Image (cartoon, rainbow, N blue to C red):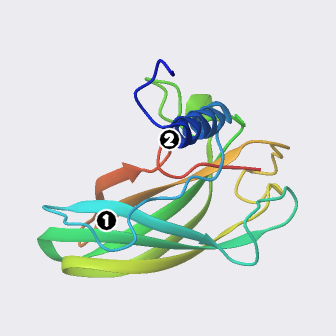
Amino acid sequence: MSRFPFSRRLQIGYAVFVMLSAIGVGSGCKRVSVAHPVAPELTGDSIQLITVQQVGGQTLLRGKPKRLIVRVAYSLTSRETAILALGLDQFPDSTSCVPPKGDVNNGGTVATVAEGHIPIQRGSHVVEVPIEWPGDTGVGTQGKIFSQGTVSLHASMWSDKPEYKFLTKWFGTEYCERF
């Protein structure tokens, strides 16, 4: 008789689940899917990443630019109109998309290599923003080639009159892609 009160099939299923979980946790920074397929409930001025689609394949390769379609949900309550800016950040560390604590720009080594801007209006909406990763070719990094690293995204809301940034959201823990 088994020491476990579960059937043999359930024990095997649990063992497979534990092994797959360990593989997923121990595999480091890879492309992370965001689990929000539809617009979430948002309150106040806020931005949330929904999905990132890589056009023409699922792998970022150094030297090969890649177009991304980024879907974000936003809520704008503090004004009638604003600008939503989406930035694509490139990190030299191939294991993380999060700058060290207390060092927002990772010692100047994190580069925003591409940006997209779209006008937005009061209310809660979902938008798609196309953005292109230059492929670690030196574009957007003043000629610096990282050779390996990760990319992630951040979004911000800007007032158009007068122009100033009033909200920023970093997605380093929600989307991190190794190249």
Q: Residue at x 51, y 21 (%)?
A: 1
Q: Name the residue that disc number 1 marks.
A: 158
Q: Is residue 168 above or below residue 92?
A: below
Q: Which label belongs to residue 10?
A: 2
* Residue 156 image offset from top left, x and y in percent: 37, 59
Quarter of the image where one finds residue 60: bottom right
**In the drawing, does residue 104 fall left or right of residue 74?**
right
Amino acid marked by disc 2: Leu
Quick check: 88 above or below 7? below
In what element is the residue under mark 2? Answer: helix
> Which three-letter amino acid code belongs to the residue tagged 1?
Trp
Give coordinates of residue 142: x percent, y percent: 75, 51
Question: x%, y% of residue 134?
Answer: 75, 64
- At mark 1, the secondary structure is strand
Binning the other alpha carbons within 10 Å of mark 2 as few (below 14), some (14 to 19) or many (20 upward) gives: few
Q: Residue furthest top?
A: 3
